[in-house]
Amino acid sequence: MDRHPPRTTSDEIDLYIRTYFSLLRSSGEVRVRAFEEAHIYSSSSLHEGCREPAPDVAAFAYSAGRLPSCIFSVRRIVLGQSHEHFEAAGLQVREWQSVSTRGRRRPLRYDGGETLAAFVTSISDIDDLIPIVTAFQIEWNKMHLLLSQSDLGKQLALAGANTQTSDAAIDLSALATALSLDASGMRTLKAALGDSLSIGLREMAQRELDLSVRLLVGSYSQYQRAAQRWWSGIEPHYLRPTHPRRPPVYFVSSNSHSVVNLLGGYARLHRDQLIQFAHKRNPEQLAEPLAEAIQRGNEAKADNLLYYLLRSFLHDPLGASHRDSVREFDKESGIQSVESPGRIDVSAQLVQIGSLKQDRVDPRLLPPDVARSFSRLSQSDAVIVNIDYPLGMAAYHLLSRLAQGVGELRGIYVMGKAATLNGRVGDVMISSVVHDEHSLNTYLLRNCFASSDVQPYLEHATVLDNQRALTVRSAFLQNRAYMGSFYHEGYTVLEMEAGPYLSAIYEIVNPSRHPKNEIVHLSNSTPFEVGLLHYASDTPYSRRQSLLSKSLSYFGVESTYGCAIAILSRILRSEIARLSSA
């Protein structure tokens, strides 16, 4: 057990990382072409077709889903850590348009012309974004070459001048022939381009892509400063003027909806409103499974679907006017949301446990023993601080700063997505060993969760405990040989946040910075409990197409809420036990 796993990166991956960081030290713009050779040589498992002349539409789709739709017009990408850094470079990003992506939460600003500004909050943003942009450009240029040799491509290139071509006017059969794509590949390409199908194809037919990247600042102190701004946006909502001390905290890293839905209850108690919305709009074809769940009396499935539908409802014209009502409803239960605190795109929800209303809490959180003692929680001064899980090393910076600003920490619980090397999409993995590529440490922990804590809330998925997780620097920064060596050593979970969180936890309970390249025992050294839960969103060994961001199926909803129920059940029971013994 106390031996290290294989080397934390392969030579090819290590070369790629050193290449882009050395080039980005330049004070000017760097052409993405400079990264392409190292990218191709790395043999990324997400981009296995990069050396082939045929398009790797799975890699293109993965990349396109993590870039904004304006990328089809962009010529340069500027990375910075704050508005001040952009403004010092002459970029007035405060006045630019905010744009977003389907697969990443990253603050982005677009000038309406050829420049995209991306805010980076940790080194992980660079590890993530550079391979994404490079893969996107490689595959774009493959498709440009193929289109330029076809009649359809020449027509699209000419149409680019007057932008008259509509999606309906594009001959998809001719497109498939030109790009040598089968039906599955065409579905993937259409999903990748989304609403920008005709625009993207016209731009692709017209020109090669030749993006450039510039990194304004990349200092560790600025990452810490960003974390300070983030906490400064949360702290006023956390402090209570009537209480002299800082309240104790249960920290949860999950998403922006599960904790609020389970404890606030708006969706469940406004079921008719959401059912009507589902029938009218049928978002992601969920109306039928919702009706079926209700007809069969499957309340757990119905509630999970209602929770998921609430977000679509509030972003639809039919439901947008209800946003204030939802906020007020949640506020009555002591729940307050803080969106993008400090202009960092990691929202937070603060839950005053003493203000929770039993009749609004999800019934799955109220087994007989908890229901009988629920009234004790009115005496609690503790706060649940839930944050929308950050990317990679941002987890380390944000938890470190939060720990400095709160009172007693009573528990740290992390729920996130992961790739699984031995399970299925939707399965839940519970790890007790985590190897972290950032610190090179192997962390051994006593995970407070076991299979029995989650399995009762899952109908379809399987819970696998006693797993080993590998915290990777980026989804692209791994190859098949590299993953295989870890799989041989029993590492079956690939994710991006557990290692940074455990490094922060080490520093919370020890008088020194976390070590490097060591085996670190956290099993008995934390005065609070630690829980890690991951649900599988990808299966890279079996189907790379699953890496394309798709509509969240019920398997994803079920796993998300199964994990969230396990976490909140643990918190409520812990707080009841503490109050009972006081």
Image (cartoon, rainbow, N blue to C red):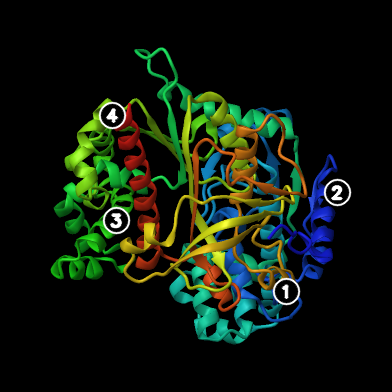
Question: Tag 4 or tag 2, which sits nearer the N-term?
Answer: 2
Tag 2–tag 4 contact (CB < 8 Å): no
User: What's the residue at 73%, 47% (across, down)?
Assistant: 439
Between 411 and 285, the one nearer to me in the picture: 411
Q: Determine whether the residue tagged by mark 2 lies in a helix, strand or loop.
A: helix
Q: Which quadrant of the figure contains the C terminus?
A: top left
Residue type beneath disc 3? Leu
Point out the frontmost of discs 2 and 4: 4
Question: Tag 4 or tag 3, which sits nearer the N-term?
Answer: 3
Please indicate, yes or no, whether residue 164 appears anywhere in the rendered image. no
| Residue to which mark 4 is pinned | 354
The Cα atoms of the two marked residues, 2 and 1, are separated by 23 Å
User: What's the residue at 58%, 69% (across, down)?
Assistant: 201
The Cα atoms of the two marked residues, 1 and 3, are separated by 38 Å
Mark 1 surroundings within 10 Å by alpha-carbon count, few (fewer than 14), some (14 through 19), many (20 or more): many
The Cα atoms of the two marked residues, 2 and 4, are separated by 52 Å
Between 34 and 540, the one nearer to me in the picture: 540
| Residue to which mark 2 is pinned | 22
Between 15 and 455, the one nearer to me in the picture: 455
The Cα atoms of the two marked residues, 2 and 3, are separated by 45 Å
The Cα atoms of the two marked residues, 3 and 4, are separated by 28 Å
